[in-house]
Image (cartoon, rainbow, N blue to C red):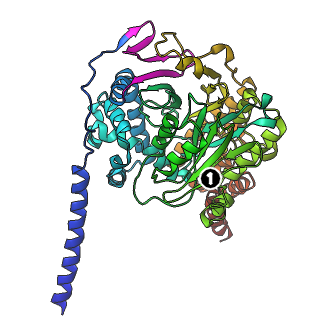
Amino acid sequence: MKTIKNFFIYLTISAFLAVVVQFFLLLNMHEFDAPTNMPPMDTTQVVRVDSALFVGSSRLCHSTSGLWEMRAVGEPFERGVAIGKLLEPLLYYQENVFVNQLTEFVPSKTYFNFLKHFIFYFNRNLDKYVDDEFKQEIYGQSLSCSHDFDFSGSSYFRQMNYHSAHDIGHTMQDYMLVGCSSFAAWDSITTNGSLLVGRNMDFYIGEDFAKNKLVSFFFPTDGYKFASIGWPGMVGVLSGMNECGLTATINSARAEMPTSSATPISLVIRKILQYASNIDEAIAIADSSKIFVSEAILIASARDHRAVVIEKTPTRQALFTTQTPYIISTNHYQSAEFASETSNIDNVATSDSPHRWKRINELIDSLQPIDYQKCISILRDYRGVGGTNIGIGNEMALNQFLGHHSVVFAPDSLMMWVSTSPWQCGEYVAYNLATIFANPNSDCQTFATTSLNVAADTSATNDLQHLYNYRHYERLVKNYIKNKLPLSINQIDSFVQANPMYYRTHELMGDYYAANNNNQQAITSWQKALSLAIPKEEQRNHIAKKLKKAERKHSK
C-alpha cells in the first residue's frame, strides 16, 4: 500500500514538474511573428533642418515649452519606420526608464522574472487582437529600438507588450498607477454654447517616465487625421481629437478581472479617432473590439454637439448619457447596466473616484459659464470636496501632482491645450488642429499657436515648494525607516510641516516611530492620519490595523 501511495505522489510531482517545464519552454520560445504583406522598408534617413528632424514628410521637434511635437505621415509601415528613426534616442530613454521603474516596484529579481514571464504568457496571443495596420506601424517603429533589452524578447515583441502596460496598470489602480478624471460641457453652461472637454491623465510610473511628453499629429493614408498626447513608443491613444472634432479619452473602472489579453484599450481609442466621425461610429468600433480591462471611454463629438461615456468590460458594453449639458467620468461606472453591480457599488464606497466626481460637479456648477481657461482651472484644482484642504498630492483631488498629462479640447474650433511641467501647474500650450491638418508639409519651429497659450499657475508656487520639500523628506523618512536610523527633531518637523494635512505624512511618521520602538508616538501619528481625508478604504484599514496592533502592545 505504501509503495502504491509513493508511486502516486511521485506521479503527481512529475506531472507538476512537466507542466512547469512546458510552461517556461513556451515562454522562452514564444515570439510574435512579424506582420505580413509589408512594403519594402523606406531607406530615407533623418535630416536636420534647424532644430527639427525630418524623415520625408514626418517630423519631430522639441518645443521651447518642453513638449515634443511629432508629425507622422504615410502608410502604416512607412509611418512606423519614420517614427522609429525620429524617436530613436527617446525610445531608448523611455524603455530604460520603464524597465528601471519596474525593478524599483519589484526589487526581488526572482519575483520580477516571474512577473515578467507571467505577463508575457498572459499576453501570448496579444498580436491576434491587434489590427494589421497597427502591427505594421509598431513593427516599423521597433526596428529603431535598442538591443540592450533583448533579454525580454525582440524589439517588436517588447513594443507590442508595452502597449498592454497601460491596461495592466489599470488592473493595479489600487497601487496608484491610474486614477484619471475627465468631463465635457456644452450648450447653456459654456461660453457661446461651445463643446469643451477637460481631462487629467493620471497614469503614474515615476517622474522620469513622464519627462518626455509627446504631442503627435497623424496623417494616415486611410481614415481621419488626428492628434494625441502620450509618450515615445505609444502608437495607441490615451487622449486625442481628430479632424472631425471627435475626442476620446479613457478612465479605468473596476469590474471583471481579466483572464487573458485582448486588444489594448489605447489601440481601440486609436481606431476610434482614426475611423469615427461621430458618436454612433465610435460606439460601433468600441462594440466590435474585445478588451481585457474595464474602461470608461468619454467620447465628445462636434457633429453631435454632445458627449457620452461608453462603459466597457471584457464581456459587455453599455452607454451612459445625461439629461444635463455636461457629463463627468472618473473611475466608476454610472450607466443603468453597471451602476448597481456589486463591484461598482464597492468601488464607489471604498475608492477616491466619487470624491473627484463630486469636486468636478461643484466646480462646474460654480464656474459657469465655462470657457477653456475655466476648464484648465478645474483640472488644476487640488482641494477636496467643498474646497477643503486634504493635503497636497491626495488622490481625492483632481490634480494629484503625479499626472502624465492634462488636456483641454474645444471640438467645435479644433483647438486643444496641453499641459507642461510641473504637472497641471505649468503653461498649457495651444494647438490649432485645423491649421496643422491643413499644412502637412509645414516646417515651422513649433506646431503651437503660442498666442493662445494659457499661463502657468503662479498661485500654486508656494504649495508646489511645500510638495517638493515633502517628497524630499518622504524619501529620507522611508530610508530611515528601512535602516532604523534616528531623524533629528528639525527633520521630523520639516517633514510634517511640508504637508501637515496629508494623511500619508502622519502614517509615515507612525511607521518611523514604530521602527524605532517609540510605540506611543506611533499611536499618536497613526491616530492623526486616521482623522484626515484618506482616499481608499483599503488604505484606511491598513493604518487602522497597524494602530490596533500598537495599542495592544501598549496595553500589555
Residue found at x 65% / y 22%: 427
* Residue 184 image-quadrant placement: top right
x, y (%) of residue 514? 60, 56
Q: Nearer the viewer, residue 306 or 373?
A: 306
Residue that lies at the very extreme toward the top in this rendered image: 50
Element marked by disc 1: strand
Q: Check the picture and name the quadrant holding the N terminus.
A: bottom left
**Which quadrant is home to the C terminus?**
bottom right
> Which amino acid type corresponds to the residue marked 1 in the rendered image?
Leu
Please tell me whether residue 363 is drawn above or below residue 23 in the rendered image: above
Q: Is residue 93 above or below residue 479?
A: above
Q: Which residue is mark 1?
A: 319
**Which quarter of the figure has residue 148?**
top left
| Image mark count | 1
Most common SS among magenta residues: strand
> In the image, residue 431 lies at what x, y percent?
60, 21
Residue situated furthest bottom in the rendering: 1
Report the residue at 28% width, 21% height from top: 42
Q: Which residues are magenta?
A: 48-75
The answer to whether residue 310 is above or below residue 460 is below
The answer to whether 430 appears left or right of 444 in the picture is right
Estimate the x, y position of residue 145 in percent, counting from the top left.
32, 30
In the rendered structure, does residue 235 fall within the stretch colored magenta?
no
Q: Is residue 73 magenta?
A: yes
Residue 94 appears left or right of 367: left
User: Quarter-wise, where is residue 49 in the image?
Assistant: top left
Is there any visible trace of residue 109 in the rendered image?
Answer: no
Which of the pair 186/59 is nearer the observer? 186
Looking at the picture, tell me which residue is in the foreground, 80 or 318. Answer: 318
